[in-house]
Structure formats: C-alpha cells, structure tokens
C-alpha cells in the first residue's frame, strides 16, 4: 500500500481521474483529468508541475564527499564547481549500471544526490574509510518539477532566485514565499525546466505559492503518463524500462554498461580508480556490444499495414513501455523499449537497444507491429536522439 | 533583372510556401514573391494590440497533413500544434453542452437533452469517420479528371474507387445523402435535439454563402470531419504563437531548402510570350523570369488579375467569373482583461479551452442566414470562438487572454455595396459583442481591445477576393474536378507554364497545405520544372 507524499493533500483534489499509481512506494498521479494530453501540452507550451518526491535523495557531507562520488560514479567530482549539477550513473565492479541520477555540488564539502533506487547502503559500503557523512533525506525533502516554456516566469514570480543567471545544469538556494528552497535548472522533459527541493513540512505552502502565480502562466499539474511522453521525445532513458539495475536481475543479458545505454559521455576513464573502471576501460577498447538508439517507424508503411485490414492507424495516445523486437533481414537484432506517438512531432518514435553494428544513423530495421492480431513488421530507421530539443532548454 | 528561376511562386501564404518548399526539396531554384511586408497571407499572427498576438484571419489549424509536417520537418522549424479536443455550446437559458474525447461524458451531457441522441452520437462519429476515411485518398492525391481518359487518370480513379468497393449499399446511400442533403436534414436523420443539431450543423456552412437548410451543406460537414480521420492523431488544433507560426515554420523549412522569399513585392502581371507564362512583372516594373509561374492567389485574382481577361479564352474566363467567391464571414479578435464566464461553467473546466460554438438552435442559424440573403450582416450571428491563450500563454500578457471569434454571416456584398463595410464595420462588431454578451454575461467589461475584420478587409488587406476565406466556396459544385473550373482541376491552367497552388485548387481551403503540396508534386511529375 503506497503512502502519501507531502504534496498529496494539494495534488489529490486535481486528480479527478483517480488514476493513481505506485512510484517507489508513494501514490503518484498517472493523469489528472479525462486524458493526459492537456498535461503533455502544458510540458511543451506552458508549465507542467509534477510531484517528484518519490525520487531517492541523499546528502553527502565531509572532506571526502567529492572523492566518494568520484569513486562511486563514472565521472570525477573533485573539479566540479559549487552550484553545478551533473548527470551521472554508477556501476558495479563489472561495469554494469546500477542506477543513474543527478549530483549537485551545494558547497565545497556538500553534495546532493538523486537516484531512482535506494542507494544509501551502496554509498556506505563504498564510503568505508572516507571522511563523509551520508544522510538519506528522501522523506524529509519534498520535490517538485516545473517544466515548460513558462516555468521560469512562474518561479520568477514566486521566488527571489536570479533565474536569468541560472544556466542549464546549475543550482541555487532561494527563498520562496519566505521558505528556503533549492532550485536546479534540470528536469526530465528536455525542455526549459527546473526542479525544486524543499523541506517536506513546507511542501503544501510551496505548492500553494507556486500555483497562486502559476495560473496566469498556464500551469498544469502533470502526471507520469505525460512525463513519460516528453522524456521519450527528449531521448531520456528510464531505469526498469530501457535498462535494468544490475543487482536486481539474475542474468547478464539483462545488464548494461553505460556505453550500452547511451551514457558514453558521462564516463571519464582516465582518472583515479572508480567502481567498474577496469571493465569499462576494456569495453571502451573493444567497443560495446549493444547501443541505445532512437528509431522512427515509417508512418506511411504503418498506415498501409492498418489499411490492409481496412482500419485507420490505431496507436495508443499514451507512451508504451513494452519491449518489442527489431529485426534485420529476419534476424533479431534488438528491441525498442519505450515508444510514443509524438503529437508534437507527428512521428512514431522509440528508444531502442540494438546490436552495435545496427546502430548507425540511417540503418533500416524492421519493427514488429500488430495492427490486428497478426504480428507483422514495418520499417524503422535509426535516427538522431533527442527527437525534440528546443533552443530554450539551454538559452539564458 | 536577369536572374532566372525554375519557378516563381506568387504569394507567401501557407500553400505558396509549401509548394515552393517541395519544389526546392526536389532541387529546384525557387523564388517566392509576397505583396505584403509579412509572410503568411491569411495564415498570420499579428500584434494588433500591444502584448496580444491575434491569429488575425484563420484561427484553427484544421487539416494540415501530417505527411507535410514530416516531409518538410516543420516541427524542427517551429511548428507546434496543440489539439482542440472539446466543443462547448452554451445556450441562452444558461444550459450548455460540452462534447469531448471522453465518450461517457458525451453520453451523459447529451442525455440531458435527449437520451436517444446520446446513444446515437458515437455511432454518428463512427459513420462520419468511416466516410471521411474513404475520402482521404481523394484529398491526398490530385483529383482524377473524368473527362480525360488517359491511362493514368483511369488508374487513379480506380485506386480511389477501390476504397468504395464492397462497402455495401448502406454506405453508398449515406454517401449519396451526404452529397445532396442539407446539414440539418442529414443530422435530423440521426438526432432529434436541436441542442445537438444546431451546434453540429454549423460545420456545414463555415465559409459558404449557404444556410444550414441549404442542400449540399451536409457534404461540407464531412469536409470538416476529415480533420479527424487520423483517429487519435486529430489534426484540429491551435498553433503556438498563433496560426502565423504555421507559415513561419513552412517558410523556415523552405529557406533551409534554398527558397528565396521576397516580401513587399506586389506582382502586377504574369509575363507571357506566345501564350506561355515566362515570369512576372512587379508593380514597380521589376521583372523576374522562370520556367514556371505558380500562383498562390485565388482563381479570380490569378486569372482575372495577374493574367487578365484579355489574355484568357472567353469560355474559361466565363467559368472563372462564375466560380463563386462571395465571402460570408468576418472575424472579431478580442484582447481580454480576464477569462470570460459562461453560466454554469467552472473556470477551471476544459470547456473554456474548447471550440466555443454560439449556435443555440436551428432557427437562430437560419435567421442569421436570412439577414445575409438580403445584403445585411446577421443581427445575431453564428460564432465560433477560441481562447488560445489558455493553452498557449505566450499570446497574451500573464493573466490576460485573447479570444478569436469567427463570425458568420457577414456578406461581402452588402446591399449598399462592399465598400460600405467601411461604415458598417463597428456596427457589425457591436452586433457580435451584443450577441456574445447574452451567452457570456460581462464579456463587454473584459474587453481591452476589439479588432473587427470584415470580408471587405479580408479582400483589401489580405487579397482574398470578396473576402472568401477558402479562395472560393467549398460547395459541392466547386470541389474536386470542378475546382476551380471543369478540366482544370490538376493545378495546370489554360496558360502554359502557369500553375495554381492556392486553396482555390483541389482539395480546397483550410490550413491544409495539400493544394501546395499536390501542385508541386504534379509539376515535378510532369517535368514542368
């Protein structure tokens, strides 16, 4: 039985659909109203506000805080500036990914980490002998995500943060209606957006202050279904969907290295030792076996497939997390793991894991598709990720 | 000036730009010449009042073909269309009807007026979608010409005919009814409540000089349903930043493909030698030459203006003159201080984001038409309103709103003559607001600025002959192989090397961009450029 997040009493009245789901033990809204689509459009045209409290949140303090994170994750933190945020992942000794998340440097010896899975015990094990204090602040920290083109205007109206100066992947402390909060220019939408961390006890007041000003900027509470659509457009992977946490699965075929899930850029091999370093160095040298790519189904072919049954194209308006096989010359070469019809791009797009030799941009594959009972295939082309990347994401 | 292009497109409306982009995509050197200083034609966003962006003319993106969006990578170039999923119809007694994507909600809401209609409603939608789907190949390809029995036209006709094979007599009967009946008669075969028939019938008259009881209007209903043929991928929607954004996106795509676009260049005449178009001359005397000239202007302007009657075959000129333009609608754009209120409607309700239809009953609509028949604007007009600022806050200052009101009837030919619109413009605006006030009490006090656009303005400012928003009425005798004239429905014109790519060509008006796309495709196939 899931529990209530500190925003629950504020969020619940909006959830006229009663469509709740369990996210890491909390009630999270799937969609608020009749459909999730107005929430999707809020992400892209106005401001979507999502309760992301169920994320796991940790504080790492002490002289060795940077050293510990450098040892635990695939990149170094010693040189990171205070006020910066980095996206990273962490691996087991065999270089297989355990989880991914963000690390913010709030002070010289003070870091804030988010994760999809509980991570305290892993950090403690790696932190033995380090001068660090590890705090699980998951329950006592409320978290909101504000994403979309008007998100900055909303936060400017209700906080004292200098958001014009806050660059992409920077973080700043701020006062919001008198309450202390931390605001990062980060998010899961691939759009202009912010994540906001507050004291759990302040959560209802923080929500109220934001909603009071947000109305003029088209703010819309948004659930997981809309979030899933925008994160696929943004090309972001999800743990448990596009890859699995190495210790949670029993066979190697289900485990992935950072190179296999498109996190190559995060891995910094040539530095002090870190978990999985040797395995990753070897993999970097020989090349990863699998690659994470974007694929796009050929719409006209898809239409013709439905047409052959005398049906109009009948794709679900929501994102799919079903794994569906990809073929080349009739041979299995991988699978799509997240798929969505993008109402914005008018394209049927997926994130996919394919064998490395099929990962080149422009490679034509066959994607399984069932229009009416029968399993058929349509052409799917490997394309650039992200599928959607507006300039406003990064511009001041 | 001696620059030679493969093609010159006259007019930077969405169709002209689309045609240019497709030609450039095929490697052709294309120049677009636009009379106004801004691009977009009737697909324009303009800041008439500081801080408020109006979709001055066209206000919903109806049928923009998804294939065009993909081919021209319009999303990359700024196209963002947000769907309009609800229809809200307020009535004068304070009740209202909200229809939307939730079938159970529709059933409940319609049942308040008729339980039978509530049950018939989804079946009607299904039937219309089915008919619409059969029509889809027609709007996605150049129309076959029955008079010319070339192998390729026979093949094309067969391909379309195949759609109808085995559909059963029931469907053919429904189709025949569609083609001949009035919107009200057709809908009355399905429904009993005027509260449903009234608001639904108006799709049959938008942009025509016909009443909801005029024969042939049932077909226009279907034309509007085609916006929904993509099932979950409905094409009805609002463009971010107003409809001008659609033209901007197509223009950016066209430029990235190498198209040259010149604004402030009014074309005076098509240059011709020995009956062939070879370029254009601007009003300032500049000349541009090309292997083909493509006109995005309406058929009247193209043939009677740019070409000139003296250079046309007399029979053809007669056909074009008979091609009905007769604009029947106007626009009122409002800058609002706060959201309008409708009795019994929650301010947070999605209904405000809907297409708000003021069409309370059949007589109301027919009376509105009566005025128009005798050369007056409707004293109580039919209105189709949207508040785009609710979904797209970028078009108004925070907390403020824009409301776009499509108004019918506003006949171009007033009894006193079209130029008298200069005197009647504000009275027309008053009639609109007075009528709206009865459905949304207090709206008058919320108005910060009112911008009234009459058919006369649509002609004078935007170059739409007689203010017809579709470049010629979408009535049955002016569609398909009759658009714009029998024998000339395939973008070619009697003037060699002159082509027609605007809404006056098949498959017609609306922000569909299909005429532009199909014209380019036909030209390329014919190796005309």
Image (tube, rainbow, N blue to C red):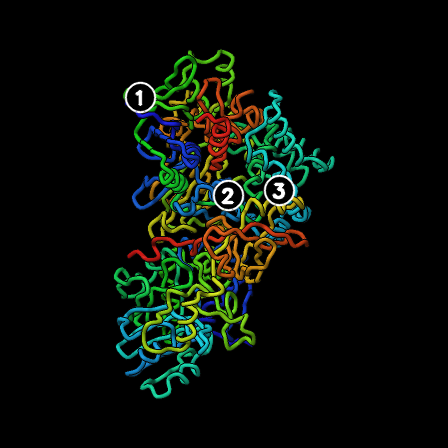
Q: Earlier in the sequence, mark 1 or mark 2?
A: 2
Q: Secondary structure at mark 3?
A: helix
Which residue is identified by label 1? B287
Which residue is identified by label 2? B66
- Check if mark 2 and mark 3 are on a common chain: yes
* Cβ atoms under marks 2 and 3 closer than 8 Å: no
Which quarter of the image is occupied by the C terminus of chain A? bottom left
Nearer the observer, B434 or B200:
B200
Chain letter for mark 2, please: B
Chain letter for mark 3, please: B
Where is residue B81 drawn, in percent x and y? 45, 46
Q: Earlier in the sequence, mark 2 or mark 3?
A: 2
Q: Secondary structure at mark 1?
A: strand
Tell me if mark 1 has few (under 14), some (14-19) or many (20+) residues whose alpha carbon lies within 10 angstroms of its own.
some
Q: Earlier in the sequence, mark 3 or mark 1?
A: 3
Nearer the observer, B26 or B283:
B26
Where is residue B251 drawn, in percent x and y? 37, 38
Chain letter for mark 1, please: B
Tell me if mark 3 has few (under 14), some (14-19) or many (20+) residues whose alpha carbon lies within 10 angstroms of its own.
many
Q: Secondary structure at mark 2?
A: helix
Query: Is any part of residue B328 visible from this angle?
Result: no
The mark lying in front, picked from 2 and 3, is 2
């Amino acid at each position: 039985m899931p529990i209530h997040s500190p925003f629950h009493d504020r969020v619940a009245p909006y959830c006229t659909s009663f469509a709740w789901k369990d996210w890491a033990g909390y009630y999270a809204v799937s969609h608020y109203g009749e459909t999730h689509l107005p929430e999707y459009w809020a992400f892209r045209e106005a401001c979507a506000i999502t309760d992301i409290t169920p994320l796991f949140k940790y504080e790492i303090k002490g002289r060795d805080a940077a050293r510990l994170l450098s040892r635990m994750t695939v990149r170094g933190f010693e040189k990171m500036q205070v006020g910066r945020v980095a996206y990273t992942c962490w691996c087991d000794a065999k270089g297989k990914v355990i989880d991914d998340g963000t690390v913010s440097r709030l002070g010289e010896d003070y870091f804030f980490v988010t994760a999809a899975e509980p991570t305290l015990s892993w950090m403690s094990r790696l932190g033995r002998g380090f001068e660090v204090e590890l705090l699980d602040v998951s329950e006592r920290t409320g978290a909101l995500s504000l994403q979309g083109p008007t998100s900055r205007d909303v936060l400017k109206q209700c906080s004292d943060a200098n958001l014009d100066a806050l660059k992409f992947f920077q973080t700043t402390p701020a006062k919001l209606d008198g309450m202390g909060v931390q605001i990062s220019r980060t998010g899961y939408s691939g759009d202009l957006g912010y994540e906001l961390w507050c004291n759990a006890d302040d959560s209802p007041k923080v929500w109220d202050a934001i909603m009071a000003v947000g109305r003029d900027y088209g703010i819309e509470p948004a659930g997981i279904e809309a979030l899933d659509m925008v994160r696929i457009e943004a090309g972001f992977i999800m743990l448990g969907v596009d890859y699995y946490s190495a210790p949670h699965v029993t066979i190697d075929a289900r485990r992935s290295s950072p190179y296999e899930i498109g996190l190559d850029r995060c891995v910094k091999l040539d530095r002090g030792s870190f978990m999985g370093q040797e395995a990753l160095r070897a993999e970097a040298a020989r090349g990863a076996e699998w690659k994470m790519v974007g694929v796009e189904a050929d719409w006209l072919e898809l239409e013709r497939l439905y047409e052959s049954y005398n049906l109009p194209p009948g794709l679900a308006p929501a994102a799919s997390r079903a794994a569906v096989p990809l073929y080349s010359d009739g041979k299995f070469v991988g699978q799509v793991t997240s798929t969505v019809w993008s109402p914005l791009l008018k394209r049927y797009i997926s994130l996919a894991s394919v064998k490395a030799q099929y990962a080149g941009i422009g490679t034509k594959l066959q994607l399984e598709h069932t229009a009416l009972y029968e399993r058929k295939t349509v052409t799917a082309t490997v394309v650039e990720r992200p599928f959607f990347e507006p300039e406003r994401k990064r511009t001041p | 000036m001696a620059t030679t292009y493969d093609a010159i497109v006259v007019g930077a409306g969405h169709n002209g730009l689309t045609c240019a982009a497709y030609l450039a995509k095929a490697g052709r050197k294309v120049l677009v010449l636009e009379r106004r200083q801004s691009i977009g034609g009737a697909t324009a966003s303009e800041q008439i009042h500081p801080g408020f962006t109006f979709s001055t003319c066209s206000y919903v993106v109806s049928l923009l073909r998804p294939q065009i969006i993909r081919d021209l990578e319009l999303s990359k170039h700024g196209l963002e269309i947000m769907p309009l999923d609800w229809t809200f119809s307020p009535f004068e007694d304070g009740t209202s009807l909200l229809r939307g994507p939730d079938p159970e909600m529709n059933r409940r809401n319609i049942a308040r007026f008729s339980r039978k209609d509530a049950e018939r409603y989804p079946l009607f939608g299904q039937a219309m979608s089915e008919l619409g789907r059969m029509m889809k190949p027609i709007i996605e390809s150049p129309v076959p010409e029955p008079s010319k029995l070339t192998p390729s036209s026979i093949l094309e006709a067969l391909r379309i005919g195949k759609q109808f094979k085995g559909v059963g007599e029931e469907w053919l009967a429904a189709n025949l009814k569609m083609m001949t009946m009035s919107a009200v008669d057709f809908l009355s075969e399905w429904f009993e409540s005027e509260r449903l028939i009234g608001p639904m019938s108006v799709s049959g008259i938008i942009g025509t000089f016909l009443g909801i009881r005029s024969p042939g209007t049932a077909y226009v209903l279907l034309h509007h349903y085609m916006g929904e043929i993509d099932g979950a991928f409905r094409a009805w929607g609002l463009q971010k930043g107003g409809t001008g954004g659609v033209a901007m996106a197509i223009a950016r795509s066209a430029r990235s493909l190498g198209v040259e676009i010149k604004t402030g260049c009014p074309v005076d005449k098509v240059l011709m030698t020995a009956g062939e178009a070879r370029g254009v001359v601007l009003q300032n005397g500049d000349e541009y030459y090309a292997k083909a000239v493509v006109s995005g202007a309406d058929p009247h302007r193209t043939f009677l203006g740019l070409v000139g009657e003296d250079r046309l075959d007399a029979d053809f000129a007669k056909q074009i003159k008979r091609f009905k333009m007769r604009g029947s609608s106007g626009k009122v754009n409002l800058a609002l201080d706060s959201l309008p209120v409708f009795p019994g409607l929650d301010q947070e309700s999605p209904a405000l984001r809907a297409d708000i239809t003021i069409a309370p009953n059949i007589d109301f609509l027919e009376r509105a038409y009566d005025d128009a028949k005798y050369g007056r604007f409707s004293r109580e007009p039919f209105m189709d309103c949207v508040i785009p600022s609710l979904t797209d806050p970028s078009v108004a200052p925070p907390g403020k709103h824009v409301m776009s009101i499509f108004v019918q009837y506003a006949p171009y030919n007033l009894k006193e003559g079209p130029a008298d619109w200069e005197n009647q413009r504000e009275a027309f605006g008053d009639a609109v607001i007075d009528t709206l006030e009865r459905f949304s009490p207090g709206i008058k006090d919320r108005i910060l600025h009112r911008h009234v656009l009459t058919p006369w303005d649509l002609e004078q400012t935007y170059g739409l002959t007689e203010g017809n928003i579709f470049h010629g009425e979408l009535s049955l005798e002016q569609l398909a192989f009759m658009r714009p004239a029998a024998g000339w429905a395939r973008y070619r014109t009697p003037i060699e090397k002159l082509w027609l790519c605007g809404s006056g060509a098949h498959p017609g008006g609306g922000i569909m961009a299909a005429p532009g796309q199909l014209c380019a495709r036909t030209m390329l196939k014919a190796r005309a450029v």
